Amino acid sequence: MMGGIMNKNRRALAGIVLLFIIVCCAVGTAETYDFGGVTDNGEYSGTLAIDNNGNVAVTIASATGATANVQVGAQDSDDANGATAMQATTASGDMVFVGSGAANANGNTASTGALAYGNAEIETVLGAVAGGTGVAAGQDTSMNGQTAIAGSLGVSGAGDVASTDTHLSDAGSIDTIQGAATGEVDFMGINAAGAAAGQSSTISASNGGWASSTATGRGSTAMTQASTAGAGNINTLQVAAAGEVDLTGLAEVSVNGAVAGQSSDIQSDNGGFIFGSAATESYEAMTRAEYTGNGNIDTIQVAAAGDIDGTLCSNSFDVGGAIAGQYSDIQSKKRGKILSGAASESYEAMTQARYSGGGSIQTFQVAAAGEVDLTGLAEVSVNGAVAGHSSDIQGNNGGNAITAAETESYEARTRAQLDGSGNIDTIQIAAAGEVDGTLCSNSIDVGGAVAGQSSFIHSERRNGGYANSAAETESYEARTRAQLDGRGNIDTIQVAAAGEVDLTGLAEVSLDGAVAGQSVDVITSGGGDGNAISTAETENGYDYARVLTRFRNGGYIDDIIQVCAAGNGVITTPIDIEAEGAAAAQFIPSGSNRIISRAVHGIETARNSERTSPAFQYAVAGSFTDGVTIEGAAAGII
Amino acid sequence: MRKNVIFIVGLLALFTMTIGFACADPSIPSPPETQGISISIVAQVNGGFSEKQETSWQTSTSPLGSGLTYPNPSFPMGGGYIGYWPGNIGLEELFGGNGNTSRGGVLYETVYSESTSATSGTIDYVKQFSADTGNKLQGTSNIEAQRVIVFTTDTSGRLVSSENLMLDSAGQFSLASEVFTCPFAPQVSEILPQFCNRVEMGSDLDISGGSVSTAASERFVSATGDYPVTSDYRIRLTGIGDQPAQGSVSAFMDVQAREGMVDILARIPFEDPDMGTLYVLNMGLASELQYEELTAVYGQITLFEKDMRFESGMIR
């Protein structure tokens, strides 16, 4: 699918590319000159255009060495739109350089160049244009050599900078269409007042290469990079822009700040790394996909910082801060890792999917920091940081998916783990700060940290797997877990939150502390053990409450709900539990699994163990209200 | 008469000068091998005395006799415009022949000469001369000459002496960051323009008695352009005891300073450091300074003193 996107974008690009259509120009009277000659070391040819409005455009081609050869098929300078210079050139030699640049009176410059050395050849169409409101430079180049470099750079008089960089470090070839523009720009799906750069490049390398795009301006920075440290190929479409930017294509984004994105495919026998980030002074968001070992990465990534509004990886968002998202697919025989993160000065959220051993990861991920309204993986409004992913992990040797969010005082995390062959299919979200919305079918209003997951784990061998979620404060901790030993499946929805929490869904919970819960659709195993457990405790375990449902040597658990909480608050289930301490409860609609609840208050303990259903089982420790206020530990069944 | 002498001295004091010009004189770095010459002369003679010295020195960043090269890589673009593309390794290799370097070509020439003869009198002559072709910091000199001569005669003896110091410099434009270590210099002017300067100073005297001292010095060889090029000449003639000097003395200074201008029509950076930054330049002559000055006195001279200084550089 992404190859199709890329080809489509490349064709669209080729339509736009030689680019010079971009800029509204004040027409002036221009001087144009052709220059060139032969030196002791090679030959060169170029054109210059200068108009009386201060616009300048230059293009040059040069080659050195005994076999130096510069063939200029077409070379032109004119004054039709400011100053324009372009050429179609084939050059070869020991060292070959072709380049084009433009500058206007407002201090905007744009340049593009290709440099190759070591039995080098370059075939290119390139040019530059400078007008009253902007400048642009671009190239459509095929090149090979021991080392090959193609780059484009746009610098605005206001200080916005956009650039692309394409490198081949140890023999191979580069095919690239790229350009950079500053000023009033309409370019490669970017409409900007600032600076923009983009490239559609294919790098065929025998030992590594990279392609990157960067934009900075208005206090924001965005960058995207695709690289391989070993042999391999990179096929990438990248854009980066700074200023007031409307981006379409990779994502639909309006930014007053900086944005960068890429649609990339890396195939390598020993490397691979794709990275995107966006940052303002206070916020940062990043995406990352990597592997070591043979395989490939196929990804679409976008990162933006500033005031951002748009749709990215199927998530609509409105952010004052930074956001990064990716749709990525890693296929490798050894290792793989994809992560996204976002942070502000006080909050941090991170999501990660990885495995070791043969297999693949397919994932949608989003991370954002600042004032965030996110719709897609979850419906949340956050003043802090949020990260989430929808991932499918298939591994021969394990894998896991992790999401976490934290503040200085609160932490929430969720994890789905597979210990052998099989797959994980999970949606996970974590957020820190002031969080309001719907997350994994639970409506939440949290001042602290919250994490949730909806996960399916399928284990093909006896190693099994588990899904757990946890939340903690400095004084309270709550955890919930679904576990499988052996072949079988886990299907669960889990939520964990810490801080001031109002939760509706698994149960009605309102408390200042930590809460965790899960709705287990099924835990099944052909011959192993399975259990679902939720625990809550206060500082040092003084008050402790736990509920557990389990089977041994094969069996199943289905449709149970567990909730546990520590702190000061109310859990509304079939009964209301108002407690200061720890409480846990579970509802068992059917089956004859062993169900156990246990409560500890200091040295006082209470335990309930049954094989019955339907049942509501609870454990409470601390000070709680059951008609009258009771201090102690209680466990029972209704 | 005494009033007249005082008047002349006062006038001379008025002409004692230190002049400076805002030229691009960037100095020239020394070659790897340097030379030093030093001479000390002390003579006390009743009879005749003669001293002749001529020192000339040319030093250039390009082969002597060839033209001054543009900095590498530079090339004509038509219409008088020059393309200058520092940092581009492809073009540096292409235009890297004929001795051109990353700095624009610079040539400095200097001549120091003295001719002194005395007859039929008593002469005390002391001279210290040194020449050093190595890099010199401010306050030190590449050429330095100091003389003290006392001459008396009871007959028709004469002391005749002339001394000249000339410094001629010319250079192509250069990137300021290639010339200066001071990181703020390129903020003043990113490119140093072409320049062509010439300064000559010296004195002539013909006396039948008196005491004269001269000091001449120059500094123009330096690893960087952070210090100005300097040329100094001072002469002081007095009588001996209560007797004024008798005869004539003159001192002169001639300066021609031509300063270019560089109009940077475009400065276009390229993304990769190996592709450098393109400058499109328009150059020409922006300033020409002519200065000619001669002071001469004759008769009974109680005091003649003149101090001249030429200073040229972007940072002064």
Image: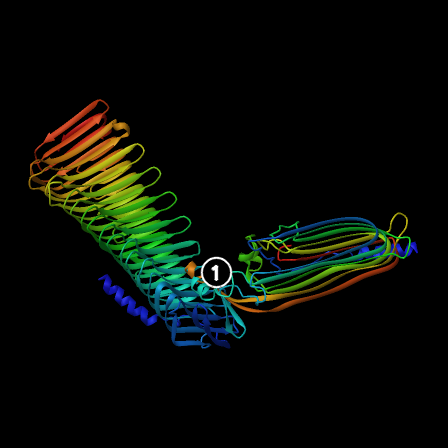
Please tell me whether residue A543 is drawn above or below residue A196 in the rendered image.
above
Q: Quadrant of residue A24?
A: bottom left
Query: Is residue B297 left or right of A586 when viewed as pictured?
Result: right
Residue at image x 44%, y 54%?
A: A219
Query: Is residue B169 left or right of A605 when viewed as pictured?
Result: right
Please tell me whether residue A471 is drawn above or below residue B23 in the rendered image.
above
Q: Quadrant of the C terminus of chain A?
A: top left
View extreme (top): residue? A603
Residue B35, horizontal then vertical, whole percent: 61, 53
Q: Quadrant of residue A554?
A: top left
Q: Nearer the viewer, residue A387 or A353?
A: A353
Query: Is residue A466 left or right of B298 when viewed as pictured?
Result: left
Q: Quadrant of residue A9?
A: bottom left
Q: Nearer the viewer, residue A170 or B193?
A: A170
View extreme (right): residue? B1
Colour scheme in use: rainbow
Q: Secondary structure at mark 1?
A: loop
Residue under label 1: A158
Callout 1: chain: A
Residue A448, horizontal then vertical, whole percent: 32, 40
Can residue A453 be spotted in the picture? yes
Residue at image x 41%, y 48%?
A: A282
Q: Nearer the viewer, residue A599 or A197?
A: A197
